[in-house]
Image (cartoon, helix red, strand yellow):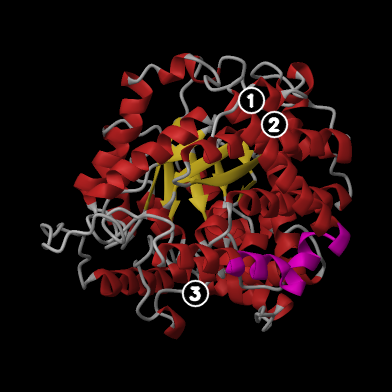
Amino acid sequence: MLYKPENIRDLDYKKDLGDPGEFPFTRGVYPTMYSGRLWTIRQYAGYATAEESNRRYRYLLDQGQTGLSVAFDLPTQMGYDSDGPLAAGEVGKTGVAIDTLADMEILFNQIPLDKVSTSMTINATAAVLLAMYIAVAEKQGVSKSELAGTVQNDLLKEYIARGTYIYPPAASIKITVDIIEYCSKYVPRWNTISVSGYHIREAGATAAQELAFTLANGITYVQYGVERGGLDVDSFAPRLSFFFNAHNNFFEEIAKFRAARRIWARIMKKKFNARNPKSWMLRFHTQTAGATLTAQEPDNNAIRVAFQALAAVLGGTQSLHTNSRDEALALPTEESVKLALRTQQIIAYESSIPDVADPLGGSYFIESLTNRIEKDVNDYLGKIDKMGGALAAIESGYFQKEIHRSAYEYQKSVENGTTQVIGVNTFVTEKRTKKLATLRMSPQVVRKQKQRLHRIKRQRSDTEVRRSLSKVKKAALENANLMQSILDSVKTYATIGEISDALREVYGEYKEKNIL
């Protein structure tokens, strides 16, 4: 296929592209892009106990990482303590176990929170973990107004694709907006939400679906924020951020990122009448595609990740995580993490790619592909709007059905060989490759975590804990902002499970409907 000027005949440079840093930000959100400042190299990490994860963070920072990204285990994400029956078998497995403020104090030991930005992949319990982070900063002598970072805090995508929700959607959105409102007043440098398409893509969505469903969720959060009394759109929109996947289709991913900025800028300016140019900017983090990693020939994954990372950089990402080659087998080893980090650093410091903003801008193919993705996304957004928005689309199962259909079509194409995966269905080696050494966690992790939790419970004041939890419950019953009561509660060393249970008593728990 050949692309020519006629493929972008109707392209208006000022209206559709603009210079980098200018509306509609197709070519990037900042005028100089990476020649002024590199993207944040932010490797996602966390496992076992706070001690082990702290060592990994300090190792990565010593190796040149420029921002932290915290992975929490499933009990922490779901609001269960490590000694609870529902936490059995999951403590420290997919991330670090955090039960109380004591764990967070260890997690960020010797890491100055006024000098590093921290992203936390946390959703249903985002308010609790953010409160713990603020409390740790205060213990370090750092004001919350100085803190920089992000909480994912995107519950809508949990109902669509991931499943780590606790409360019903209305309560979840209420807590999300509580965080947005609180940070707008008291933690002004904090990104209050990372509207996440990554997990939607991992579940099987196409590039256009990833973008459309994510932007539909973003629209919903802005609508609820505007409807919250006293919140002007320009008071919180500049601190919204996004999180996208970088998949294998190199040029499609670059075009997807460019289209995302253009669509969001127009939505914020025209639909929400935002006046601040920062409210129009779509700033995003990228992670390379976990779904493309293969257990067969795992060294191939390092090559896949390099191309995905390059697509993210050419697409104008603000921060980037590169997956490790062994993640289809286990949590990554230190050696694999270092290789993934070096992949970013080679692009950043050896390739000269950062010297030019949007180097593929003006390509007949890239601009045509950007236009096509924009059209497909807008078609989806039109359908979702007619349904009544993202919440209605979730409740009807529309998002889920669309993703399942796309996932099925993709898997079928792999199995019949239409989609080629090297080492899996193409160029398959019968001879066993050398086994890769993987990370093994100590069986003592659970015991150590429970011991610390029980020690903290013995040392704290039960009276103060009960009083603080009653204030959390009272704020929830009165529909007040929860953040200050949660912050007061974590300072008494109330556990994440205790705080979550107080809210469960008010909001209940969400049970997924059979919609398929």
Q: Nearer the viewer, residue 206 or 175?
A: 206
In percent of width and height, residue 186 lies at 68, 40
Report the residue marked by disc 3.
Answer: 80
Q: Nearer the viewer, mark 2 or mark 3?
A: 2
Q: Amino acid at mark 2?
A: Met
Image-based side of 98 in relation to 199, left or right: left
The verdict on residue 395 being magenta is: yes
Q: Residues within 10 Å of mark 2 (few under 14, many from 20)?
A: many
- Which element is circle 1 on? loop
Q: Nearer the viewer, mark 3 or mark 1?
A: 1
Residue at point 31%, 61% (across, down): 425
Could you say which disc has been placed on residue 281 in the image? Answer: 2
Residue at point 53%, 40% (across, down): 253
Residue 55 visible somewhere in the drawing: no
Q: Is residue 334 above or below residue 473?
A: above
Tell me whether the residue at label 2 lies in contact with that at label 1, contact meaning CB atoms closer than 8 angstroms.
yes
In percent of width and height, residue 268 lies at 80, 37
Q: Amino acid at mark 1?
A: Val
Alpha-carbon span between mark 3 and mark 1: 39 Å
Alpha-carbon span between mark 2 and mark 1: 6 Å
- Which element is circle 3 on? loop
Furthest-front residue in this view: 1
The region drawn magenta spans 386-405
Could you say which disc has been placed on residue 29 in the image? Answer: 1
Please name the predominant secondary structure of the magenta segment in the image: helix
Residue 395 visible somewhere in the drawing: yes
Q: Earlier in the sequence, mark 2 or mark 1?
A: 1
The verdict on residue 206 being magenta is: no
- Which element is circle 2 on? loop
